[in-house]
Amino acid sequence: MPPPYFKLKHVPLRSREAEEQLPLPLFMEPQEAALQNTRRVRPKPTSEDSSESRGLALSVLSLAGSLAILAHNGSLGQASAMLTVIGVHELGHLFAAQWLGIPVNWPVFLGPFGAFINLRRPFANPVEEAWVGVAGPVAGVLATVAIHYAANRCDSTVLMKAALFGYLVHLFNLIPAGILDGARIAALLGRWLWVPGCVALLWYVYKFADLGWKNCLLIPMLLLPAFYRAWQVLSGKDKTLPAPHVPYKAVHYCCVLFVSIAVLLTCAVGLWRAGESLSERESAEVTRSHTQTSEEPGHILLP
């Protein structure tokens, strides 16, 4: 569908402009004669166009701010690669929602907290929720694999760390709990997965998260929705949730399950390979620095 500014309409010409037109052919149809003395103009922008422009501007500004924050804490190249993974992930959600006919806003980036997109209407059924949920990890993992390949080709430690970050983030995001994408996928595969997902998320937070100011804000945002979804399952409230009839639901179930397993295995294998590559490069750098120090004058090598 072309952009709104290509939707042109016909308006009558003024009398002077009509007089300057060429004479009409002899056998012209009346409708064609009416369109002969018309001109094409651009329609006035609507409120939807202005809101979309504001959303795009907010997305660009939040992306620039997130890049500045992440580059301040690390290198610019690593920050750019990390935001590329997050941005492609959110664009996967965006394009999937638009493909399903769900109006959605542009993604808003939150620096170290990731990003989010705002749906303008709720999901009509679990199939829509699952496909929108799995589209983000698919796009993000493909971007991570591309960064991993570039890191091996360019022998770049910065890109390898960004690839390691992408695999870790998507493995964590596939936990079926709270506001994570795994919970949206579990809406189709089985809402009972919200209970073990809540336990897994609680274990992860207890095991790996520190109590810095970032996590003090992020942990409640993750745990409270996870507890609520698990309570819905344990109390039987999930049976009262709407479950409309969807054609070919079994086909969607199998496809979403296959794609989810493929993404999970790709993340696991990529995380293992990226971790090994980083360990080898760090050991090689330590050996190289030790060799350079030993070759300096004044240092004696002892047997």
Image: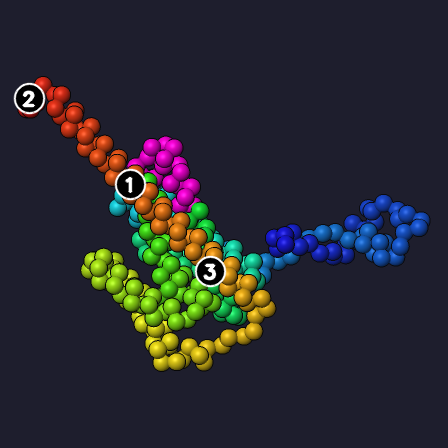
Name which quarter of the figure residue 1 lies in: bottom right
Magenta: main secondary structure: helix
Q: Earlier in the sequence, mark 3 or mark 2?
A: 3
Closer to the camera in the image, 245 or 225? 245
Residue 90, numbered circle: none
Kindly report which numbered mark, 3 or 2, lies closer to the viewer in this rendering. Answer: 3
Give how far apart the Cα atoms at labels 3 and 1 are: 29 Å
Q: What residue did someone put label 1 on? A: 276
Label 2 Cα crowd, 10 Å radius (few <14 / some 14-19 / many 20+): few
Residue 22: percent from the left, percent from the top?
A: 85, 45
Residue identifier under label 2 = 300
- Whether pointer 3 and pointer 2 mark residues with C-beta atoms closer than 8 Å, the reply is no
Estimate the x, y position of residue 138 in percent, counting from the top left.
45, 52
Q: Residue at x 54, y 66 (%)?
A: 250
- Disc 3 and disc 1 in contact, CB within 8 angstroms: no
Q: Residues within 10 Å of mark 3 (few under 14, many from 20)?
A: some
Q: Which residue occupies the extreme right position in the image?
A: 26
Magenta-colored span: 143-159
Q: Nearer the viewer, residue 253 or 105?
A: 253
Please say if 237 is above or below 81. Answer: below
Q: Which quadrant of the figure has residue 238?
A: bottom left
Residue 54, horizontal then vertical, whole percent: 48, 57
Residue flagged by tag 3: what amino acid is it?
Leu
**Which residue is under mark 3?**
257
